[in-house]
Amino acid sequence: MKGLAGKRVVVTGGSSGIGEATCRRFREEGAEVVSIALDGEIVCDVADPEQVAAAFDQVGELDVLVANAGISMRRPFLEIGEDDWQRVLDVNLGGVFRCAQQAARRMDEGVILMTASTNGLSGHELYADYNASKAGVILLARTMARELAPRIRVNAVCPGYVLTPMQRAEYTEEMLAAVNATIPLQRHAAPEEIAALFAFLASDDAGYITGAVLTIDGGETA
Ligand SMILES: NC(=O)c1ccc[n+]([C@@H]2O[C@H](COP(=O)([O-])OP(=O)(O)OC[C@H]3O[C@@H](n4cnc5c(N)ncnc54)[C@H](O)[C@@H]3O)[C@@H](O)[C@H]2O)c1
């Protein structure tokens, strides 16, 4: 991909799943990559403003942020407690907000990418808090794209089902097959396929893409 060699890239949630694959991909492109995560190269809880500020102080100037750290809990709407709601919103939406703000202050020109979800585009049962957080991420990206242009491009990526190690552990073979049967491409995405989209969006080839919400879901929402 054009223009990624030598770029300074920060990936939040870079220690697992989509984030880990994204770190790998950017390194393959010749970028300098730092992972910020609960167990990243820089250890930080993105829900905590002071920890986030300290983490970005350590990073210094950067060119690309992939704000990807996120959590989900599967529960009926009526059983979501105040603490659960607060935590999911604090990590998934607040975390993206505060990392993006810290990053934008340390960029001359750059790119900020966010991991939203197809869950932010339409209702999915048993994930009300998660869905609300991801819908928030989408509008945050679109608003930031307008405010920060032309200096910084901002885009949101909406993966559908991605077979991360954690997700795989939750499935029996039968459950995996049943979900795959609902997806036009008949399979989950590999984390590397989401990483490839992030690499493209951060590259000079995507120089005119900002404020976009890109779905990568094997046709699920088509
Ligand atoms: N796996 C999927 O099917 C799927 C689909 C759509 C969107 N997503 C989104 O993609 C992103 C990554 O998901 P994944 O499946 O790779 O997850 P994962 O559980 O494999 O990895 C999550 C990463 O986020 C980090 N993290 C979690 N809470 C954090 C916190 N408070 N502070 C700092 N870091 C924290 C973890 O340390 C880890 O590195 C999430 O935002 C998730 O909502 C995943």
Image (spheres, grey):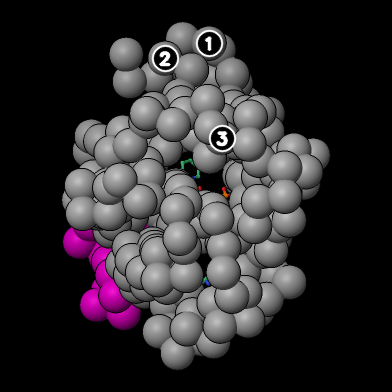
Label located before the other in sequence (3 or 1): 1
Amino acid type shown at disc 3 = Ser
The answer to whether residue 82 is magenta is yes
Coordinates of residue 183 in the picture (x, y in percent): 46, 16
Give the structural element (helix, strand or loop) at label 1.
Answer: loop
Coordinates of residue 74 in the picture (x, y in percent): 40, 54
- Cα distance between the residues tagged 1 and 2: 7 Å
Amino acid type shown at disc 2 = Gly
On screen, residue 56 versus residue 35, left or right, reads left
Query: What residue is disc 3 on?
Result: 203
Give the structural element (helix, strand or loop) at label 2.
Answer: loop
Residue appearing at x 78%, y 43% in the figure: 30
On screen, residue 118 versus residue 175, left or right, reads left
- The relative height of residue 157 versus residue 106 in the rendered view (above or below) is above
Residue appearing at x 54%, y 77% in the figure: 56
The answer to whether residue 83 is magenta is yes
Query: What's the magenta region?
Result: 75-86
> Quick check: marks 1 and 2 in contact, CB under 8 Å?
yes
- Please state which of the two labelled residues, at mark 2 or mark 3, is closer to the viewer: 3
- Please state which of the two labelled residues, at mark 3 or mark 1, is closer to the viewer: 3
* Label 2 crowd (10 A; few <14 / some 14-19 / many >=20): few
Residue appearing at x 28%, y 38% in the figure: 211
Query: What residue is disc 2 on?
Result: 219
- Cα distance between the residues tagged 2 and 3: 25 Å
Query: What residue is disc 1 on?
Result: 185
Front-lying residue, 177 or 104: 104
- Cα distance between the residues tagged 3 and 1: 27 Å
Label located before the other in sequence (2 or 3): 3
Q: Quadrant of ligand 1?
A: bottom right
Front-lying residue, 206 or 175: 206
